Image (cartoon, rainbow, N blue to C red):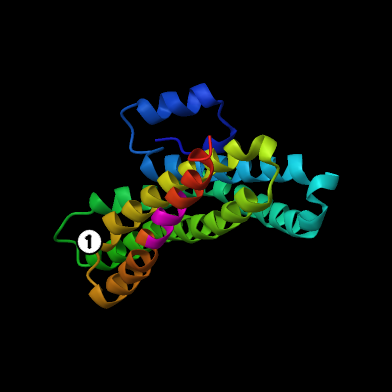
């Protein structure tokens, strides 16, 4: 199970690995990649808008959005490998004999660590959808379909991140901690899934 630098694989290599009989890369890494792709499309809209006289009133906002979008994109790319790195100790923890007195403590820590990556991706995607909404509203009409595509992809990343959080929290012994994380996810999942749909349809329905 070699998780070294999935982000440096070619598209073909990564998807071959994703389709294979290994635990990583899996849904978490794929969701992180989707997040990066969605955000990149927002940056593309910004690139085609910035500097255009027609959108001069939004120039400052677009540049601010582009700067933050690039920070989020790079973090999402890093989470492709981060997800695999967090999963490997968890996979090893499950192989610890059930009568080992330290098993439960190790497993609980590994579950927390494994949940942290998709939780960060979830929050990152929430912010990216807010940014995409602005790109869709203020970006060049010539390339606004890319904002719609980006929103659709980010909607998938959001749901992928959410389910990869829950697959870990459901097994945690510390239910207070798990419930807190689950409440955080549940509180935003419907709202931002709807935002992804709204941004997409604000553009799609005009064609």
Considering only vertical position in the picture, is 61 above or below 175?
Answer: above
Front residue of this view, candidates 70 and 115: 70
On whether residue 7 falls in the magenta region, the answer is no
Observer able to see residue 191? yes
Considering only vertical position in the picture, is 182 above or below 13?
Answer: below
Q: Where does residue 31 sit, x and y in percent of width and height?
A: 44, 44
In which quadrant of the rendered image does the N terminus lie?
Answer: top left
Query: Based on the displayed image, in which of its 4 quarters is residue 30 positioned?
Result: top left
Observer able to see residue 51? no
Q: Where does residue 130 sit, x and y in percent of width and height?
A: 56, 59
Judged from this view, the residue extending furthest toward the front is: 206
Q: Secondary structure at mark 1?
A: loop
Q: Which residue is found at the position 62% from the left and 42% from the top?
A: 40
Q: For the magenta stretch, what is the residue range? A: 191-196
User: Label 1 crowding class (10 Å Cα cut-off): few <14, some 14-19, many 20+?
Assistant: some
Q: Which residue is mark 1?
A: 171
Q: Which residue is found at the position 28% from the left and 72% from the top?
A: 179
Drawn side of residue 42 relative to residue 148, left or right:
right
Q: Which residue is found at the position 29% from the left and 58% from the top?
A: 166
Drawn side of residue 74 relative to residue 30, left or right:
right
Q: Which residue is found at the position 32% from the left and 71% from the top?
A: 183
Front residue of this view, candidates 198 and 129: 198
Considering only vertical position in the picture, is 25 above or below 168?
Answer: above
Secondary structure mainly formed by the magenta segment: helix
Q: Where does residue 158 sit, x and y in percent of width and height?
A: 42, 52
Q: Where does residue 44 sit, x and y in percent of width and height?
A: 68, 40
Query: Based on the displayed image, in which of its 4 quarters is residue 84 positioned?
Result: top left
Drawn side of residue 60 relative to residue 42, left or right:
right
Considering only vertical position in the picture, is 51 above or below 180?
Answer: above
């Amino acid at each position: 199970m070699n998780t070294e630098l999935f982000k440096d694989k070619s598209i073909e290599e990564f998807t071959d690995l994703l389709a294979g009989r290994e635990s990583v890369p899996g849904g978490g890494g794929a969701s992180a990649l989707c997040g990066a792709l969605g955000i990149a499309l927002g940056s593309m809209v910004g690139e085609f808008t910035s500097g255009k006289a027609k959108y001069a009133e939004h120039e400052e906002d677009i540049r601010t959005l582009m700067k933050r979008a690039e920070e989020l994109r790079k973090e999402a790319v890093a989470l492709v490998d981060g997800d695999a790195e967090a999963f490997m100790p968890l996979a090893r923890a499950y192989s610890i004999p059930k009568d080992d007195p330290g098993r439960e403590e190790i497993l609980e820590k590994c579950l927390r660590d494994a949940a942290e990556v998709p939780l960060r991706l979830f929050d990152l995607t929430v912010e990216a959808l807010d940014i995409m909404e602005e790109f869709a509203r203020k970006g060049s009409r010539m390339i606004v379909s890319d904002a719609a595509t980006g929103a659709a992809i980010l909607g998938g990343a959001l749901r992928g991140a959410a389910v990869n959080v829950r697959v870990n929290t459901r097994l945690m012994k510390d239910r207070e901690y798990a419930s807190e994380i689950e409440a955080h996810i549940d509180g935003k999942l419907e709202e931002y899934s709807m935002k992804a749909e709204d941004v997409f349809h604000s553009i799609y329905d005009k064609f």
